[in-house]
Image (tube, helix red, strand yellow):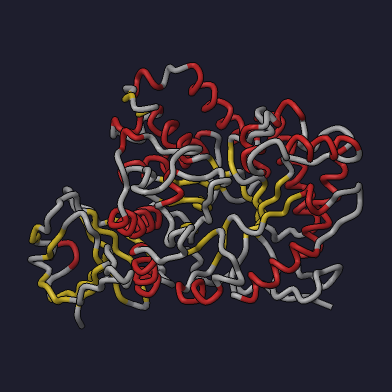
C-alpha cells in the first residue's frame, strides 16, 4: 500500500527558516509563511543507536511529526561524526562532560584524533543505520514511521565543512560515497546534500580566486591581506585544495551543494556563489545551490556576548537596522544568482554555557535570549508576503543601483537599493518602466514598547524613486 506523497515538487520553496522550537514557535512560523526548514532535525547516530543494531527513533519521530504538522519540508542532518560502543562509549561520555557543553566538546575536543566517525567495524553499522533511517521516513508504505505526513527527501550528510572529526577530505568523500549509495538504495527520489562550505572559508576561497574584488574580504584577525598574498598563504591554500578535492572526487555522490552564506558585506555574497559555480564547472558538472545556513551582517552586536565565536572586530558592530536590510538584500541577490533555497535563522537560544555567540546574537529574526521579534522579523514577513511564489528573477542593476525584478502572479515586484545613506531621487523609468509605482518600505526600527514601526506605503513616479542603502519594494500601479 503506497504511503504519503511529497507535496512540494511544483512549489517555489525559496524561503526557509532554521532552528525553530516546533512547539513554542509554531504560530510564529506559520505567520512568516515559509515552506522549508534547514538544519533540522538532526539525526544523531550516537543518540539513536546506543547498541549495535538497536535503534531508538522515539525522539526523532516526535520532532518530525510536529515539524510536518506545520507543513514544512524538513532537512534531515545526518550526523555520523561521533559514535562509540561498549567501554569506549562510557569513556567518551566522561570526556564530553569535562567540557562546558556538547558543542564545546565537538568543536574543541580533538575528535579527529579519537576517530569516532564510521570506519572499520563501525562503517557497516553506519550504513545499516542510514538505510533504516531513510526507510523509516521515505513514505513508501513499508516500515514507515506511524503517522508520517509526507515523504522526507532532503538528507544533508554532515552539516558543515570543515568537519571537526574528519580533517581528511579523502575520508569524507569515501563516507559520502557509501552514504549516498545507502540513501539512494532505499529512496531513489531522495536528495543528498553535500556538507555546507563554512561562511568564512567561502569568503576567503572566493577572494583568493578573484571572485570578490572588495579588499575587505581578505581581512584575517583585523589585518587586511591583499589578494595576491592571500592566494599564496600555505594554510589557506591547503584548506582550499582540500575542499576542491571534495568537489572533484565527490561529484557523483551528491545532488545539492550547500553554501553557508554568513555575509559581512553584501559585496561578498555574489562572489561566493560564483566561486562555487566556477569550481563545479571546472570539474565538469553543476548542481543546484541551497543556502542551508545564512544571514547577516556577520558582525558582533552591541550588548551581545562575543567570547567563543566572535566576528572580526575590523568590520565594526552590526545593528538591528542593518540586519533588517540584509534580510532583503541577501535574499534578493541569492535569488538573482539562481540559488534555489535560502535559509534565515529564527533565533538561536543563547546563554552562558552556549558555544555560539558573537554574530549569532544579532543576525537572527528574533532575539534568542528575550524571544522578542526584531525589525528583521517584520521585514522578513513583508518580503515573503510580496515575493512568495515568484517564477522568475532578473538582475537589472545599473550603475550603483541594485535592481532585482521578481515575477510574482503576473506582475513584477522590484527590490531596489544603493549605497547612499540618504535617499536620492533617481530616474529608473528606462529600467522599470514609465509610470507611478507603489513603494512598500521595510521595518528597520521598533518603538520603545518593541512594536514595529511601519512606514506608510507611498506612490512615486519611476522618474524620481528615492533610493538609498535601505531597500524597498516597488510595484507599478495598474
Residue 299: name its quadrant: top left
State the residue at coordinates (86%, 56%). Answer: 55
Query: Is residue 145 found left or right of 67 in the rendered image?
Result: right
Q: State the residue lying farthest toward the bottom.
A: 478
State the residue at coordinates (75%, 45%). Answer: 179
- The quarter of the picture where the N terminus appears is bottom right
- The quarter of the picture where the C terminus appears is bottom left
Q: Position of residue 247 (x, y in %)?
A: 58, 36
Q: Position of residue 274 (x, y in %)?
A: 41, 41
Q: Report the number of numbered marks.
A: 0
Q: State the residue lying farthest toward the front.
A: 352
Q: Nearer the viewer, residue 361 or 66?
A: 361
Q: Position of residue 376 (x, y in %)?
A: 36, 62
Query: Is residue 333 found left or right of 88 in the rendered image?
Result: left
State the residue at coordinates (24%, 65%). Answer: 472
The answer, for residue 216, to whether it is visible in the render is: yes
Q: Position of residue 256 (x, y in %)?
A: 58, 50
State the residue at coordinates (62%, 39%). Answer: 104
The answer, for residue 281, to whether it is visible in the render is: no
The answer to whether residue 212 is above or below residue 401 is above
Residue 119: name its quadrant: top right
The answer to whether residue 321 is above or below residue 314 is below
Query: Is residue 224 found left or right of 45 in the rendered image?
Result: left
Amino acid at each position: 500500500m503506497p504511503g504519503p506523497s511529497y507535496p512540494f515538487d511544483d512549489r517555489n520553496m525559496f524561503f526557509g527558516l532554521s532552528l525553530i522550537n516546533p512547539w513554542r514557535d509554531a504560530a510564529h512560523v506559520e505567520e512568516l509563511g515559509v515552506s522549508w526548514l534547514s538544519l533540522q532535525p538532526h539525526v544523531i547516530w550516537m543518540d539513536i543507536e546506543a547498541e549495535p543494531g538497536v535503534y531508538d527513533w522515539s525522539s526523532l519521530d516526535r520532532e518530525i511529526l510536529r515539524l510536518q504538522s506545520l507543513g514544512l519540508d524538513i532537512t534531515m542532518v545526518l550526523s555520523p561524526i561521533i559514535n562509540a560502543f561498549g567501554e569506549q562509549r562510557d569513556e567518551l561520555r566522561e570526556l564530553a562532560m569535562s567540557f562546558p557543553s556538547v558543542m564545546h566538546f565537538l568543536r574543541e575536543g580533538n575528535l579527529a584524533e579519537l576517530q569516532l566517525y564510521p570506519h572499520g567495524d563501525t562503517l557497516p553499522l553506519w550504513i545499516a543505520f542510514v538505510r533504516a533511517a531513510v526507510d523509516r521516513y521515505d513514505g513508501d508504505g513499508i516500515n514507515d514511521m506511524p503517522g508520517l505526513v509526507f515523504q522526507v527527501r532532503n538528507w544533508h550528510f554532515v552539516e558543515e565543512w570543515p568537519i571537526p572529526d574528519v580533517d581528511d577530505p579523502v575520508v569524507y568523500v569515501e563516507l559520502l560515497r557509501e552514504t549516498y549509495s545507502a540513501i539512494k538504495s532505499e529512496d531513489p527520489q531522495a536528495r543528498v546534500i553535500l556538507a555546507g562550505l563554512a561562511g568564512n572559508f567561502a569568503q576567503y576561497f572566493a577572494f583568493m580566486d578573484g571572485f570578490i574584488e572588495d579588499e575587505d574580504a581578505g581581512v584575517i584577525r583585523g589585518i587586511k591581506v591583499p589578494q595576491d598574498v592571500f592566494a599564496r598563504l600555505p594554510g589557506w591554500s591547503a584548506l582550499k585544495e582540500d575542499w576542491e578535492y571534495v568537489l572533484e572526487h565527490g561529484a557523483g555522490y551528491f545532488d545539492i551543494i550547500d553554501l553557508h552564506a554568513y555575509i559581512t558585506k553584501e559585496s561578498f555574497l555574489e562572489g561566493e556563489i560564483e566561486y562555487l559555480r566556477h569550481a563545479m564547472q571546472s570539474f565538469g558538472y553543476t548542481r543546484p545551490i541551497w543556502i542551508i545556513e545564512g544571514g547577516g551582517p556577520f558582525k558582533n552586536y552591541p550588548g551581545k556576548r562575543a567570547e567563543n565565536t566572535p566576528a572580526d572586530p575590523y568590520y565594526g558592530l552590526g545593528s538591528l537596522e542593518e540586519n533588517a536590510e540584509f534580510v532583503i538584500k541577501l535574499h534578493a541577490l541569492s535569488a538573482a544568482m539562481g540559488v534555489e533555497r535560502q535559509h534565515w535563522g529564527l533565533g538561536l537560544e543563547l546563554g552562558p554555557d552556549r558555544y555560539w555567540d558573537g554574530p549569532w546574537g544579532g543576525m537572527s529574526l528574533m532575539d534568542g535570549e528575550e524571544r522578542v521579534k526584531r525589525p528583521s522579523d517584520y521585514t522578513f514577513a513583508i518580503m515573503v508576503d510580496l515575493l512568495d511564489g515568484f517564477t522568475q528573477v532578473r538582475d537589472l542593476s545599473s550603475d550603483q543601483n541594485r535592481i532585482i525584478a521578481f515575477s510574482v502572479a503576473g506582475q513584477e515586484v522590484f527590490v531596489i537599493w544603493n549605497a547612499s545613506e540618504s535617499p536620492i531621487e533617481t530616474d529608473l523609468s528606462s529600467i522599470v518602466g514609465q509610470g507611478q509605482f507603489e513603494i512598500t518600505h521595510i521595518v528597520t526600527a521598533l518603538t520603545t514598547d518593541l512594536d514595529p514601526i511601519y512606514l506608510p506605503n507611498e506612490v512615486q513616479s519611476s522618474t524620481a524613486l528615492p533610493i538609498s542603502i535601505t531597500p524597498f519594494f516597488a510595484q507599478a500601479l495598474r
